[in-house]
Image (tube, rainbow, N blue to C red):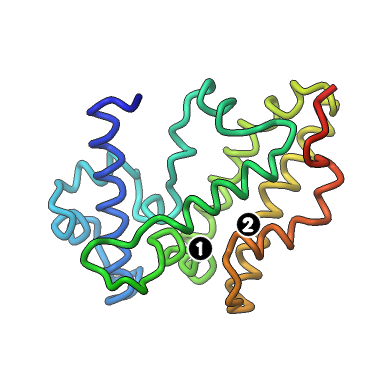
Amino acid sequence: MTGLRERWRLKAMHTVQERALDLFDEKGFAAVTIDEIAAAAEVSPSTVYRLFGTKEGIIVADEFDNLSDADLHRVVDARDPIGSLLASVRAYESAPAAATSGATDPSPWRRSLRYHFTEPSVRRAAYASADRTSQRLTPVLAATGRFTEAQARVATNALIFGYLAALEQWFLDSDDRSVAEYVEDSLRPLRPLWPTGEPAN
């Protein structure tokens, strides 16, 4: 069960991200300061820095970054990491927009995607985050016994960086399908690595 402090932290993160996106959409990413974001979110600038580190971090941060090793094993099915990834995408995509937004507004996560691919500093931060994710997932997939350490590293990088490539192509295509549907189709070439339902060795 999530503790009170953790619930406060997650709520604060979501509020800061939503207010930051409002400002980025209104003024442009480069023109917005941490102080402005903090004021809009009604928190201190030091809180924003503590939660995200940088302005780019506000865009690329997600709950996965803070998972413990035990939670990581709970969230990621090593026999079907593509399925686990798609479940996360569906959860992010279905997250409600801010209460002040109209009912037709996209989720904050979906709103943030364009900054991954239009702002060079955010793109660099997203790829650095993907590398950290790959480093954490490689031993999880290697532990199944299905891959050697080298194979697990290659497979994990193919999955994580393939996912980013799929997101970028979705953005470039302006596709009207859900992000999850587009990502699932784009990752189909990787599916033979983890046939759905096949038990780990």
Residue at the (35%, 24%) spot, across then down: 1
First in sequence, mark 2 or 1: give its number.
1
Q: Where is residue 159 in the image (x, y as percent from the top left)?
A: 72, 47
Placement of the C terminus among the 4 image quadrants? top right
Q: How crowded is mark 1: few (under 14 residues within 10 Å), some or many (20 or more)?
A: many
- Closest to the observer: 30 or 96? 96
Compared across the picture, whether 81 is left or right of 24 comes to right
Percent across and percent down for residue 73 are 59, 25
Circle 2 SS class: helix
Name the residue: 14% across, 46% down: 44
Question: Looking at the image, is 64 positioned above or below residue 1?
Answer: below
The answer to which quarter of the image holds residue 81 is: top right
Residue on which the image places disc 1 = 116
Residue 103 located left or right of residue 119: left
Tell me the kind of residue under disc 2: Leu
Residue 64, image x and y in percent?
49, 38
